[in-house]
Amino acid sequence: MPRNAREVDSTLVASPLSDVLDRRGVRPLLALAAGCMLWLAAPNFDLWWLSLGAWALVLWICDGQSLRRVAAYGLLMGTCVIFGGFTWMTELLGRFAGMSLAPALGVHLLFSLYHGLLWALPITLAHGLQRRGAGPAYLTLPLCWAAAELTFPQLFEVHVACFWARHPQLIQLAEYIGAVGVGAVMVLANGLLYGLISRWSHPRARIRLGGALLALSIGVPLFGVWRMEVIDARVDERPTLAIGIVQGNFGIESRRRLRRESLHALQRMSTELEAEGAEVVVWGETTFPYGGFFRDSVTDLDPSDRRRVRRGFTVPVIFGLPTRDRREKRRRMWNTVWVLDGDDQLGDRYDKNYPLWFGEWVPLVDPDWYLDRFPNASYIHVGEQPAALRVAGYRLGPLICYEDLLADFSRDVVDRDVHALVAMNNESWFGRSRAQPAHLNLAILRTVEHRKALARSVNAGISAYIDPNGRVVQELAITDSDSDGYQGPGGFVANVPMMEPEARTFYARVGSGWRWLSWLCLLGLALAARIRRGPAPPK
């Protein structure tokens, strides 16, 4: 290994068309193009195959560049991915905070720049390791990506594995390495592709890299097909629970205007689903449109009360609602889901553990001031711990709002020995946008990570049933009653397998250990490179 690390960096890979790259502005434009490829790979465009070339393109434009330029190109790529993937944010800020277009776009851009660092950090680290002789960036980048994605503090969880989520044969490795590991495999495919192209004139490297890329391209989907057959056989042996998923289809404004009608719609759909065989029905997050329930409530409201939950159906219902302490005069509440048993007794309750930043919680400000400034917001108490909801003889793991995006928290829920997962969401703030399909794709990964089915009730869509192999078996369309007028509820009955409650996948047992392992591997590569270089020559 030559002692001159910079020489290694600039000669390791012979960049094709280098004269084109050296023209002013070409590299930044190509970094933006790579970012566009990734947000086109995301839902709802779903051009997933573009994810197999974006990092390869960035590796090409970063070859031989200074670390400062590498970081800049990575930041450009990442900012473009997030800005394009989160186009709904500008509209949300207008609906939620009343922002005009210019400041909303400014907040959107700042958010994108912050999350763009998630792309800049790993590619800079990979090239820094390459300069120190730890190996070519196209081979260390997957490990750097995993370390960064597992560590970087995100306001909204973003995992590139969601690009493949609608192709379940590609994500079965999540049972062992989680969603972040699937993303690392995606980056590895890009790295091998770039390595193959850039080292094409070297026969031994061409054979080695080409063989590795071919093995990965064939092995991952073949493993997925085989593993899905194994899990399907296990599912066939398990009992099922018929869960009725109710999608209220009301928006933020229509729910406020049509409280009585929306409650009747939920009850009517629950009655229809019970007639279709539902043994339990699920309503979405905060879908109950009234007050009336307090922390010490033990039964449904009186039959003479128009706010009563149970009318027309007899099966248990899991419903979302805000709850308050009778003794607390402030406007703070809990974001709660509660089980109402068939005998009208309130059973297990779960309070949301992770409030949504700026929507349900803001650091360092007075809650009353914030609620006066943003009346559409809430300010909730934080739930104490994960829970299991006992209903119909089974244990269901509840996830509220964006908690089904949180891999670590979902693992804690599964540790409560649940048979299946159930998510209650309110995404009416997003209208019809890319937010809902992106959220669903990320939630799909939880089912493969833990081999537990997931039933999602989302107030205006996308409600869905996802099986333990990550297949979306049933789903309902997105609606926007604030724009189109209220058209009534939707729903379906899903026969959800009740998997072994004590069973844990390899990923569930290892969990966040992958974070430490990835950093230890990177540290090992750096130390090994230092040992190979030997002591620095005397000055």
Image (cartoon, rainbow, N blue to C red):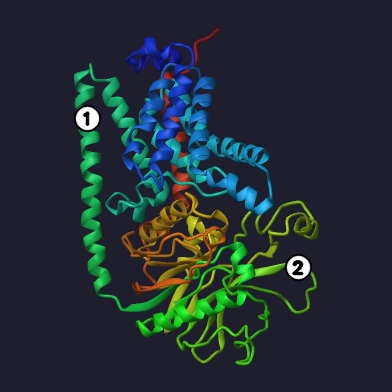
Residue at 57% from the left image edge and 76% from the top image edge: 261
Q: Please give left or right for residue 61 compared with residue 287 in the image.
A: left
Above or below, 128 relative to 330:
above
Is residue 530 visible to us here? no
How many other residues sit within 10 Å of disc 2, few (<14), some (14-19) or many (≥20)? few
Residue 162 point in image, percent of width and height: 40, 48
Report the residue marked by disc 1.
210
Q: What residue type is labelled 1?
A: Gly
Q: Quadrant of the C terminus?
A: top right
Q: Residue 458 carries which label?
A: none
Residue at 25% from the left image edge and 75% from the top image edge: 237
Cα–Cα gap, marks 1 and 2: 62 Å
Mark found first going from the N terminus, 1 or 2 = 1
Q: Quadrant of residue 289?
A: bottom right
Above or below, 92 relative to 418:
above
Q: In which quarter of the image is the N terminus?
A: top left
Closest to the camera, between mark 1 and mark 2, is 2
How many other residues sit within 10 Å of disc 1, few (<14), some (14-19) or many (≥20)? some
Above or below, 38 relative to 456:
above
Q: Are marks 1 and 2 in contact (CB under 8 Å)?
A: no
Residue 202 point in image, percent of width and height: 22, 18
Between residues 491 and 301, which one lies in front from this camera angle? 491
Between residues 270 and 260, which one lies in front from this camera angle? 260
Q: Residue 331 carries which label?
A: 2
Q: In which quarter of the image is residue 468?
A: bottom left
Between residues 415 and 172, which one lies in front from this camera angle? 172
Residue at 55% from the left image edge and 68% from the top image edge: 285
Q: Please give left or right for residue 294 compared with residue 157 in the image.
A: right
Residue 405 point in image, percent of width and height: 49, 55
Residue at 36% from the left image edge and 78% from the top image edge: 242
For the residue labelled by badge 2, is the local secondary structure a helix, a strand or a loop? loop
